[in-house]
Image: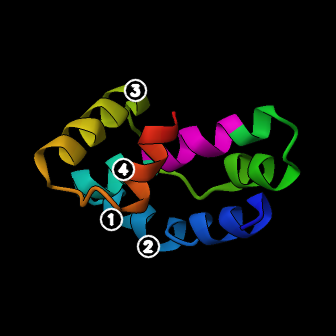
Amino acid sequence: MSDTKVLIESTAPLETQTPACNAGKQDACQQLAVLHSELSAWCSTGNNQACAAVNVGPWPVKWDEPALIDAAKLACLSGQFKPDSRTCQALEMM
């Protein structure tokens, strides 16, 4: 699978997860923090679509990305997120 196809599929949750995070759903915030970090890494390698997603969003209004990534790691370890979920798989690559 190409990076572009993965990128397009991975940005789809922004439309639903961002409002959920803004409403206080921590699991949505954790998933978005991992996605943002992953897209930022792709952007740093010159992937223009990733940069556009990072710059445009929509991303949550207020969040502590490092703390949410740590919480997502714990959620993967505890089974709150399934090991084969996109979030847990992305964390393994980080």
Chain part drawn in magenta: 33-41
User: Which is more foreground, mark 1 or mark 4?
Assistant: 4
Which of pointers 3 and 4 lies earlier in the amino acid sequence? 3
Write down the residue under mark 4: 88
Residue 74 percent coordinates (x, y) = 20, 37
Name of the residue lying farthest toward the left: 78
> What's the residue type where badge 3 is placed?
Pro
C-alpha distance separating marks 3 and 1? 19 Å
C-alpha distance separating marks 2 and 3? 21 Å
Write down the residue under mark 3: 66
Up-down: is 72 above or below 18? above
User: Which is more foreground, mark 2 or mark 3?
Assistant: 3
Residue 80 percent coordinates (x, y) = 15, 55
Which of pointers 3 and 1 lies earlier in the amino acid sequence? 1
Residue 62 percent coordinates (x, y) = 41, 39
> What's the residue type where badge 4 is placed?
Cys
User: Which is more foreground, mark 3 or mark 4?
Assistant: 4
> What's the residue type where badge 1 is placed?
Ala
Q: Is residue 44 visible?
A: yes
Residue 1 percent coordinates (x, y) = 71, 67
C-alpha distance separating marks 3 and 4? 15 Å
